[in-house]
Image (cartoon, rainbow, N blue to C red):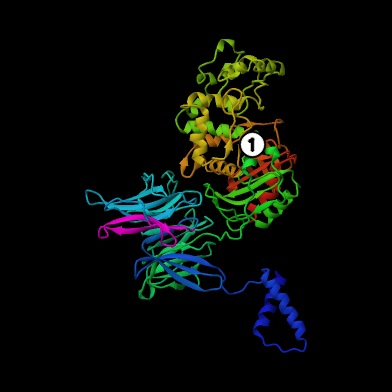
Amino acid sequence: MIEKYIFCMIKNTLKLTKMKNKNMKYIKIVSFFLTLLTINGYCQSSKESTSYTIAFSSTESGDVGIYQRNTDGKSAIKSTNKKGGYLAWSPDGKQFAFYHKYDEKKTWSIHTMNSDGSNRKRLTHEKYKWDNSPAWSPDGTKIVFARAYKDTDNNWQHEIWIMNSDGTNQKQIEGLEGGGPYFTSDDRIIFHSQPTPSEIFITNMDGSNQIQLTHNEAEDWHPEVSPDGKQIAFMSNRDGNHEIYVMNIDGSNQKRLTNNSFDDWYPSWSPDGSQIIFSSLRNGEKSIYRMNKDGSSVRKIIPNATSPAWLKIRTQQNYIEAPEATTVEVKGSFRDIPKLKKAYIEAAPMDRKDGISVGELGVDGGNKEMILTLARRIAGNQYGIYDSFLIAHKGRLLFESYYTRGRINLAHPQASATKTYTGLLLGRAIQLGYLTMADLDKPLTSFLKDLDPSKFIENVGKTTLHQALTMTTGIRVSEENREKMRKNPERLKGQGEVQALFEYSDPITPESKLFRYSAGPALVMQVIDAVVPGTAKDFIKNEFLDKMGITNYDWPTAPSGLPQSGWRISITSRDMIKIGIMALNKGTWKGEQLIPEAFIARATSKVVSSGENAIYFGGAINVSNEGYGYLMWNAELEYENKNYFTANAQGGGGQFIILIEELDLVIVTTGHNNRYPSTLRMTAEQILPAFIKQ
């Protein structure tokens, strides 16, 4: 830092002083050297170098306009020549959502159009309803908006609705009364309540779990979440007239930013969260102003304008495309995938419109240099043979990397991580009402009606779903008996698989019922197939994979004729991230409760101790107290004398989905022939400090 300060001081001195020196060659050399240092980022210029784009509504024409400023400091305004207000950019910056008035301004409708004014499309058509304040979901697939109208008793009603971004599937979010809705990065919604006094709330997308953030007898309106998800900017008249305020995402640390006798409205964050724009009536006209996020350096940038919306998108022109498998490679064997010549390491992943919100490592969380250093070591096989390594923080994918056989579009073999997915499928069946949490303590025979209990060995008929999920059934089949089972494969079809296990198992004893990998996942899949409508195969696709937007996968069939339950399926690393985010969000994905929170709590907690039976990567330095939940591992990771609990899916060869709730962290790795003692140890020693010491 001292060297940087000295270099900058010398540079500024050379720029401001007319120096006449006999040794002009020396000065030229120094100037040249300092120029190189400046180019490489050692010195920061006072000149503002950020480029940005802002959409607004003209107060003169009513048209939607676009204000653009480039890196040279030059600005320009162009008009779309289309009317509109309450503007909202789509996440990819290609479209606006806005409202427009009909029927002598008695009907307000939501529209979309391209950023150049083309392809204008009306999405809502309710007559004499005021549809306004549209906002896009982080993945761009949905639009939430406010609706106000007078009912038959002439009373105002204030509702919040949601629809697909093409206008289909419009539905009211029950229980929400207010306006100004806005999505958070983890697909929750913030809004202001109506009627007055208006308070700001945060809620799940389905309207559940409403939390009030402000508490005062005033109008708190138009909340917008900062790009890093940590703060909310909003307008309030709590101190007299409308001013701009900010607060933390949990409602704490509320602070006033503007202070004048005129009204200030509609705050919108800059892409990096360092500045805020807003509309104001200062100087007798509605104009758009810009200020730093602490309220300093207020200046007018767009006259005769209102409803500003700052485009929050990074340029992607310099991105290196992630490695992809060819069509032939996708259809072939994973073993035949050629090794990458160079690792792909990206600290600002691309938005691939796959349902995953993205951010930037070091900006939205984490120590960028620490993770990049780790990634370079992984590329050098210092920790084993990895195929991918991804990190999501606070619901956003911040880091993505691929090595050896890893490809962004290649479904990777999951090995025993499959067991975790099978457990989640059972949770999905509970969420849909085909089972209850109480059913977990019932014998499997309660659900499997094609069995003949008269042939069971003693006590095996008491085996419960809970025991199957925790690998404590006590069912052990000797190699001799397994050979007998293999000789008659037809007998193993359907529930015949369970019948054979219950007949050929060794005696059930207290010792055999200690934790140990066994047939638990297969028994769980049998129950799923028995209780859901149709087949387990269709249930997996329609009620789990499709719900999460997982389309690139291979889920083969087991000898029983049912889907594999313990191994052999393949999904992409990005889809592993989705499953991790859903589990960390207590079973919620895109605002929908896919799996009961109570089931997730059991799945991710230490239900049994794994003892000496930690199958793959347990017992390492800084990894302790390994246990098992519902077909999911868990452990304590230690860093600087503090333990962080992790629940994780594990698969042989290096397949991991690691959840660390305390840090809101999801870590995914895939690999093959990975013999490094512990991916969990690597997480404790290399990844935890990058998110603890930010």
Task: Identify the residue at image location x=63%, y=52%.
Answer: 691
Q: Is residue 174 above or below residue 484?
A: below
Residue 355 in picture, x, y percent from top left:
52, 47
| Residue for badge 1 | 414
Tell me if residue 657 can be seen.
no
Looking at the picture, which amino acid does disc 1 mark? Answer: Gln
- Bounds of the magenta segment: 93-120
Relative to residue 623, is residue 498 drawn left or right?
left
**Residue occupying the far left of the picture:** 153
**Front position in the image: 608 or 76:** 76
Q: Is residue 674 above or below residue 167?
A: above
Query: Callout 1 environment at 10 Å: few (<14), some (14 to 19), or many (20+)?
Result: many
Quarter of the image with the C terminus in it: bottom right
Tell me if residue 114 can be seen.
yes
Q: How many numbered circles are shown?
A: 1
**Front position in the image: 209 or 267:** 267
Residue 256 in picture, x, y percent from top left:
45, 65
Residue 151 in picture, x, y percent from top left:
25, 49
Element carrying mark 1: loop
Relative to residue 505, is residue 465 drawn left or right?
left
Q: Is residue 109 magenta?
A: yes
**To which quarter of the image does residue 649 belong?**
top right
Q: Is residue 542 above or below residue 507?
A: below
**Front position in the image: 224 or 537:** 537
Quarter of the image with the N terminus in it: bottom right
